[in-house]
Amino acid sequence: MLRVRRDKLPLIAAAVGAVIPTLGFAQSAAWTFNNNGIGSWTNSWNINNNWNPPTAFPNASTAVVTLPAAALVNGAGTIVLNVGVSANSLTVIGTGTNNNNYLITGTGSLSIADKGTIDISSVGTTTVAVATLNTSLVSPATSNIFKANSGVLYLGGANNFGGGSGVNGLSVNGGTVVAGSAGALTGLTVVSTAGNGVLDLMSQTVGSNATPVFFGPGSVGTPANGMLHAVSGTNVWNGLWVAMGNPSSAGVDTGATLNFNGPVIDGTGSTTNGFSKVGGNGLMSVNALNLNGPLSVQAGTLRITAGATPALPARASSTSSLSITGTGLLDITNNKLMVNYGTNASPAADIRAQIKLGRGTGTWNGATGITSSTANAAAANAFTIAYKDSASGVLPALPANTIEIAYTVMGDINMDGLVNGTDFSRLTSHFGLSPGASIWTDGDLNYDGLVNGTDFSLLTSHFGQTLGGALPSTAITSLEWQAIDDFAAAHGLTVPEPTTVSLLGLGALGILPRRRRRSN
């Protein structure tokens, strides 16, 4: 997994951001396609009299190429490209109600110069211009090209950005780029969106290692589907996401998945940044969420990928606030999430409510809220999600104004990874008090608002268990079991057999026969 020190994030953002240049280039040698409005047609790119001026066809790194609406008239235009050509920019202007205005196909390749553009212009507010590029799109090594305006660019060819070398970028500064072929995004190391720009993914794998970076600058105009939108299939991004502003967002349609083999991080220390999982009920997974700004899960599942060791918290994620609405589900698997709420009111009550939703019927099968698929896959009540607020003063202490949400062993009330006498003392000191208002750190282990015999049974059946293994790392003393037996006798409770301690071990302590008699 790519790990990034948070104190290095501004430097990383600045360094990678430097390779995404601002739009601007010297235009020269302009050609307009000249088909005289004959309706649907097919013509070759490399025929001089197809272009105005007709003295040559556009083939130079400075060429400015326009496919105008006048050439379509409400028909469909297909341009066959059987030779390799170069251009600085390609502008496609839509017309009428035809949503597949231009198709560029053939065995040749189209090379767009560094800092060049592909501009797909729609007509009015109701027509969406679409240009389908089924030939190969290439760009120079260490370059960046721009998708501009509000139309759709469909990439259906075997593309090669930058020739597979250097830092190569695609900036979607407006409209949508649809990656529809297996090789649509080959060679890209940096992708960014701006304004209402969207990158649609259809069964894409980007990068063979942790080099690709997705920049989501954010915008108040971001569509409901998100800046990065997984439309279909399994989509894998071998890199990180630098969330920058307003906040960044991703959508995953039902039946699709989007797997980031890297973290989602804030590009700066601003708390206005953040990340939102929006639109669609599909699954998005990330290695970590290291956010200075807010985290919002509005639709579908956002999962923090589980670590290699099933019972150990793999990664600590962070955010300034947490909002789960609609069909949103946050799956922390075997990780932890720190909510640094600062000077705002503590969100502990809302977080407890979301955990209760995610717990579902008790097996972490809830459709919304905060859940753990790792706990769901384990034996019933073996592991759980716990939470505590720094304001509670429960040791081990947390940083001020912080809530920790974590996967842990059942009964670990103080969230130190071990169920022992400290947890038992907290439960007994709150036993039967504040009915309906108790919380996890009081000993409410099943989230019913009570600390009672059910919680006592859940704790004692896991007494001595650690988060890191199936057997306790320290011996359970006879005095500890004596305290449990005495409390049970005083309250008419039955002491269950621990699930993680061998019966021989209990017998060696000389307490098993007496405990069984009392339980009967």
Image: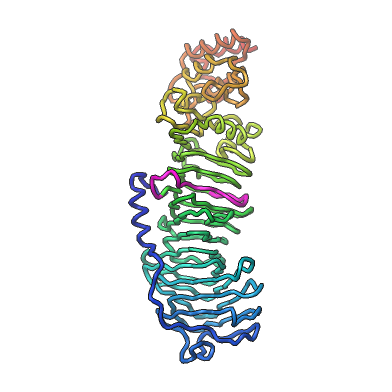
Quadrant of the snapshot with the C terminus: top right
Residue drawn at the location 64% of the way across and 41% of the way down:
367
Write down the region rendered in magenta: 267-284
What colour scheme was applied to this rendering of the protein?
Answer: rainbow
| Residue at left offset 55%, top offset 78% | 104
Nearer the observer, 20 or 455 = 20
* Residue 271 lies in the magenta-colored region: yes
Overall secondary structure of the magenta section: loop
Residue 112 sits in quarter: bottom left
Where is residue 136 drawn, in percent x and y?
A: 50, 74
Q: Could one spot residue 183 in this view of the protein?
A: no
Q: Examine the rendered structure and indicate whether residue 272 appears above or below residue 82.
A: above
Asked whether, in this view, residue 224 is left or right of residue 242, the answer is: right
Q: Report which quarter residue 455 is drawn in.
A: top right
Q: Residue furthest front?
A: 124
Q: Position of residue 452 (x, y in %)?
A: 61, 17
> Is residue 149 on the magenta stretch?
no
Viewer-side residue, 435 vs 156: 435
Q: Residue at x 48, y 37 (%)?
A: 337
Which residue appears at 46% of the width and 39% of the height? 320
Q: How many marks?
A: 0
